[in-house]
Amino acid sequence: MHKDVTIAAIHGNAPRIHPSAFIAPGCRIIGDVEIGPDASVWYNCVIRGDVNRIVIGARSNIQDGTVIHCDSPDPRHPQGFPTVIGEDVLVGHMVMLHGCTLENRAFVGLGAVVMNGAVIEGDGMLAAGALLTPGKRIAARQLWGGRPASHMRDLTDQAIHEMQLGVAHYVGNARAHNEALARHGTTEA
């Protein structure tokens, strides 16, 4: 693991990180967090699973400065609101995810916010800077934007293809960063 990464257990739950995942320096990963194969968590992200679980699926990327949290169970919501991120998901820089679900191949643009109980279905996209309010659902192949977010248009096959190219790019770029950091002595022995 790279220097300057905090991985800590709390309430008896420790992060579980697949050996092929890339965790960049500056990240803080706490509690009931699972990170899958070839996933990448970029510089200075905070992933805090202290009151519920957080899952990040295979090949998904969580870009620089993103904060991911969840919400506790309560009488109205006995399961609380875990944050569940599927496979091949793109999460842009400086995103806030809180107690939401991003299905396989979802996309969240730079600086967007996704709140408790919200869902982005596979191949759905939330635009940069948007706010997806509690309980809202972006259907497959839809683009939502604004604050609060609403449906803007449907996505083309080309847009869907470009999102998947982005996933492949981040898997390869994470490997390159991991190798560069190892060469420059920023990993622990």
Image (spheres, rainbow, N blue to C red):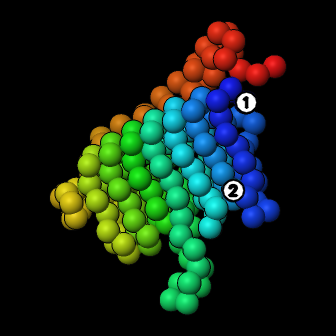
Q: Looking at the rendering, which quadrant does residue 179 occupy?
A: top right
Residue 182 in percent (x, y) is at: 69, 15
Q: Looking at the rendering, which quadrant does residue 22 occupy?
A: top right
Residue for badge 2: 31
User: Residue shown at 61%/14% (left/top)?
Assistant: 180
User: Residue shown at 52%/41% (left/top)?
Assistant: 45
Residue 125 in percent (x, y) is at: 33, 53
Q: Indicate the amino acid at tag 2.
A: Gly
- What is the distance, in whole Å, between disc 2 and disc 1 at their CAs? 17 Å
Seen from the viewer's position, the closer of residues 185 and 121 is 185
Residue 136 in percent (x, y) is at: 34, 72
Q: Indicate the amino acid at tag 1.
A: Met
Q: Secondary structure at mark 2?
A: strand
Position of 5 relative to 150 (above/below): above
Position of 130 relative to 75 (above/below): above
Is residue 86 visible from the viewing direction of this image? no
Question: Crowding at label 2, few (<14), some or many (≥20) Cα neighbours within 10 Å?
Answer: many
**Disc with the residue nearer the chain's start (2 vs 1):** 1
Residue for badge 1: 1
User: Residue shown at 73%/30% (left/top)?
Assistant: 1
Q: Looking at the rendering, which quadrant does residue 186 occupy?
A: top right
Q: Secondary structure at mark 1?
A: loop
Q: Is residue 7 left or right of residue 88?
A: right
User: Residue shown at 54%/46% (left/top)?
Assistant: 46
